[in-house]
Image: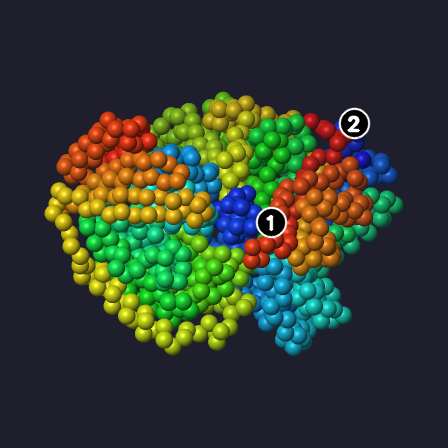
Amino acid sequence: MLLGLDIGGTHTDVVAIGKDGIAASAKVVTNHDDLLASVTGALERVFSAIDVAAVDRINLSTTLSTNAIVERTTEEVGVIVSAGPGVDPQAHAVGNRYYAIAGSIDHRGTEVLPPAEGEIQKAVRHCLKNGVKVFAAVSKFSTRNPAHENRIRDIIQGNADFTTVGHELSGALNFPRRVSTAYFNSAVWRIFNRFADAIESGVVAHGIAPAINILKADGGTMPLAVARRIPVESILSGPAASVMGIVALCDIVEDAVVLDIGGTTTDIAIFADGAPLVEDGIELDERATLVRALKTRSIGIGGDSILAVSGTSVTAGPERRGPSMADGGSAPTLIDAFNVKKLAAYGDTAASEKGVRALAKKSGRSPEDLAGAAIDYAMRAIKEASDAMVRAINEKPVYTVHEVLEGKTIVPKRLYVMGGPARAFSDALAKRFGLPITVPEQYAVANAVGAALTHATMDIELFADTERGVMLIPFLNVNERVSGSYTLEHAKKDAQARLADHLAGLGVKSAECASEIIEAASFNMVGGWSTTGRNIRVKCQVKPGIVKGYRVG
Amino acid sequence: MITAQNKLGLIFFPAFDWAISPTHPEREERLLYTQDQLREEGVFDIAGVTEYKPLVASEEDVARVHFCLPDVASVITESHLISAGGAIKAGELVMDKTEQKAFALVRPPGHHAMKVVHGNRGFCNINIEAVMVERLRERYGPLRVAIVDTDCHHGDGTQDIYWHDPNTLYISIHQDGRTLYPGSGFTFEDGGPNARGRTINIPLPPETSDEGFLYAIERMVLPILTDFKPDLVVNSAGQDNHYSDPITNMNFSAQGYARLSELLNADIAVLEGGYSIQGALPYVNLGIVLAMAGVDYTAVREPTYDAACIEQPRNIMPFIKKVADEVLAAYFNPSGERGMPGNYDVRRKGVFYDTDMIREEQVESIMICDECAGTLKIETSSSANPLSLCVEIPIGACDRCRDEGLRIVHEGKKKKGKDYAHIVLINRRDREYVRT
């Protein structure tokens, strides 16, 4: 049996799914001051309804790290960077203990200037004296040569509780993002590990030892052991759980738009050939990171979006002032508009009627006219936001002649809608989009279902330079010598094999971690007029997906 | 988070699947390390810097500018249409005011491609700046344009295309033609009879360093631009003046290039040459991008930079100051005989296409005109194509020049098959681009 638990802003949802479908589910109010209590509370509710011994796996989506960062309750981090020439590293300063030391590595991974050991020691001493216990070591081009980051860590070692080294977070090139990501990782390291300890002992207390995984923003999971080392990967996984829920509940095969409609907002996701699109790095607390995430966009239109009239125009949202009048609220909202237009019959329809009529009277309209205009406004806003997303994806820069001329263009063929107001919105959305629409039956627990059924994801970048004779997979800490005969084919094979080995070592079932090569290029390096070697780059990923054999849709 | 002072659009198109040949300087690897550097520095995350996909230029975009023989499709590949499309995208971003500035980091380059195209010369098939400028004029109306070419090689192609256009000021700063391909670009080359002083050449001696280049910008280029008052300044941003470039002999640095970009304050930059792909391009491009965006670039430095090694020899500044006198005279007091309006001014040219090993002979005749840029007639033959007739009726052509252009084509058609293998007409006044 697989358990999925999603901590949301309002509720914490949990489901237990067996081969025959959903065995149990529960919803508890999220206690933001004690997330652990919310988790254990929700788990207890489900545990009491099922055979605990049958639980193989628990997947958790938690807002713990995100909240700590946004609410600035994280721990102080000593950030030590070696940047060398280029953009001034002070432009990327983060936290109160940021030290840019001398040292530089170029784009090929060649050391230009060794790291200034004296400066590192001084920075570390200064941090320790001020009670700093966790560090982040980041150098420019560390994914081409991790020597400086490793040296900084070696100097810190023994004096700190934890040090994040940039290249172990991602193989991507982006020094400012590496700095932010490493900083956030160390900043939430302790709080996350305490949470992990508590979860583990809570589960052990039931006499069971299921695999425990943490949800990531890219829609996949990571084993708890990995999350303890890179807790930053647990940020902003909320929208991902819902999107994976739709994947579990519906059989999506074409280009599609997925909408998760809540009380205040609608989250939009775009699918290409049935797979959710991932973006390379999400922003958190106004800083760009290297944490990959499902491409989602949130707009301020939801069931409880308040209706407003100004002059001749009628709008809805982004403001929310409590529930709809149908739910006992005091001002008419979109749900009330749907009730008035008889597109829904939710809650107290008479209250909706009364509220919309009062607002309509003030502006000299009929209630139907006002409700229609408000719905129109909301549908247009959702359609425009979704079109803008598709346009941006289709306009994404590409770097080969082939891709410019033959590149895939996304054209959504179907709309998938979930969330509380999904049914009420569906006809109006289908009309506005001009697309067939699917509203899955169990959309209310889609997020927890998504959490339960999604599997591990991982992405790695392999870089090889046969002139220098090196092959690196920074994320897996692989740094090996290769000969001049190393080719793109070797690199592709190595990338997939190393990724599979690594996942197997973490206990991920091989059926759940089929990897694919998403980018592969080999460039002849020429010195003078003859070839001196090959510069090889391979990106390989296990993309987000749903465990087979448990489909509940 | 860094914020740009100028909203900057970047069109980065490295054509990772296109090369002239596997070990040619113009190969797949050329912008690889530049992309690495820009990504690692987080340039695409700077608030106000946006990356765009290039457009694909149409064959008509090419046919509006060039006389391609035997036809457009025969002398280009798709990569050329994308490279030109990248430049066009940059131009449209600025003209539409979507961005304040734009930089097309594209390849292959274009500034050696002349008015007539029989093949590839100096790594160029079509002139991507000219294709861009003429599309902008077609779409947005008349524009006074200044093209400042800071590639180390004389931009003989751009010079040839705008030789007769009084509304386009072409300034080329380059290594002295006596010491480098293509061997032209002297101060006395200053434009045709209808556009005297609209072509300006600034030849600099080998081993010119930051001091000499910045002097040329401050004392020659900027005063001329101030006087010309262009609607649009385009920088043909070649990067082979760098001290590490393998096929040139100059001593310019990444800091120098960044400062040059800041001083020039171009609306649009388009990458041209530059073949020190590891030691120069990543740093020069970073410097240019930061300077255009108005972000501090002072810490950009090549790993191999050594100020003492690239210090300018003492005898260089006096030489450059002498060039300055000639340059300022060429622009402010253009001399030279100009024939009577209504008559043709004729010159003969031999053109060599080094990449494709084609020899071309041309007789070029321009109608001397006080009313417009004058109708242009070129009779051309080469080792690739038999004698052909090319006629251009310029934008805003006067009635006489338009009628004259149409008459030449009409007469030519009578002789087609006997005298002319191909007849190509660029009629900018009526927007017709015809080939027979």
Q: Give whichever of A410, B243 is nearer the camera.
A: B243
**Residue at screen point 39% across, 26% down:** A369
Instruction: Tell me which chain the residue with mark 1 is part of.
Output: A
The colour scheme applied to this rendered structure is rainbow
Q: Position of residue B128 (x, y in %)?
A: 38, 45
Q: Measuring 84% from the left and 39% from the top, which residue is drawn there?
A: A52
Q: Is residue A334 left or right of residue B208?
A: right
Q: Is residue B320 above or below residue A47?
A: below
**Coordinates of residue B227 in the picture (x, y in percent):** 22, 59
Does residue A358 show up? no
In the picture, residue B320 is in which quadrant?
A: bottom left
Neighbourhood count class around disc 2 (C-alpha, 10 Å): few under 14, some 14–19, many 20 upward: few
Specify the label residue A523 is tagged with. 1
- Image-quadrant location for residue A153: bottom right
Instruction: Give the left or right position of residue B370, taking residue A165 as reference.
Output: left
> Which amino acid is tagged 2?
Asp
Disc 2 is placed on an element classified as: loop
Q: Report whether residue B303 is seen.
A: yes
Q: Position of residue B135 (x, y in %)?
A: 33, 41
Residue A20's label in the rendered image is 2
Which chain is disc 2 placed on? A
Q: CA distance from mark 2 to mark 1?
A: 51 Å
User: Secondary structure under badge 1?
Assistant: strand
> For mark 1, does the 10 Å Cα neighbourhood hold few (<14), some (14 to 19), or many (20 or more) residues?
many
Q: Which quadrant, please, contains the C terminus of chain B?
A: top left
Classify residue A340 as left or right of residue A146: left
Q: Amino acid at mark 1?
A: Phe
Q: Compared to B331, does B76 lie above or below?
A: above
Q: Residue at x 47, y 59 (%)?
A: B247
